[in-house]
Image (spheres, grey):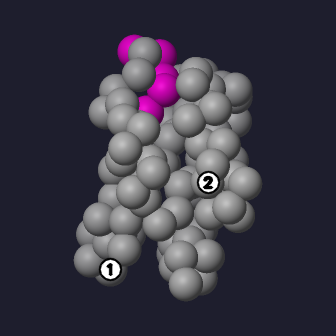
Amino acid sequence: MKIVAVSACTAGIAHTYMAQEALMEECKKRGIDCKVETQGGMGIDNELEQDEIDAADVAILAVAVSIEMEDRFDEKRDAGKLIEVNPSEAIKNTAALIDRAEELAK
């Protein structure tokens, strides 16, 4: 299984990177391939390419602000394979979020 995600919070600092770390750690525990792009105070890091998004089973937007290039996820949204949550949700309830992603991937 492959998950791609974007994390971004209002300040673009703490929660952006905490959400990235939480998602990556939970996926690693489960043996899930995961790549998380951050859109924070330092700009875009670990940018997702369109082919990576297309190849993913599920995409997660853990964002509290509008993000750049959100249209890259239109096909995932249309296919019902996109989960949108606040970064704090991705940090506090990471296991439940990945459970939800696994269900969507079926």
Between residues 105 and 31, which one lies in front from this camera angle?
105
Q: Are marks 2 and 1 in contact (CB under 8 Å)?
A: no
**x, y percent for residue 78:** 72, 54
Give the quadrant of residue 46. Answer: top left
Residue of label 2: 76
The residue that appears at 50% across and 41% down in the rendered structure is 6
Residue span colored magenta? 38-42
* Left or right placement of residue 98 versus residue 9 in this view: left
* Left or right placement of residue 66 versus residue 1 in this view: right
The residue that appears at 40% across and 15% down in the rendered structure is 42
Which mark is on residue 30?
Answer: 1
Where 3 falls versus 42 (above or below)? Answer: below
Q: Amino acid at mark 1?
A: Arg
User: Quick check: can you spot residue 64?
Assistant: yes
User: Quick check: can you spot residue 15?
Assistant: no
Residue 39 lies in the magenta stretch: yes
* Left or right placement of residue 10 versus residue 41 in this view: right
Where 75 falls versus 32 (above or below)? Answer: above
Q: Quadrant of the N terminus?
A: bottom left
**x, y percent for residue 105:** 53, 76
Q: Quadrant of the C terminus?
A: bottom right
Circle 1 sits in a helix, a strand or a loop, which is it?
helix
Q: Exactly how many numbered labels are in the figure?
A: 2
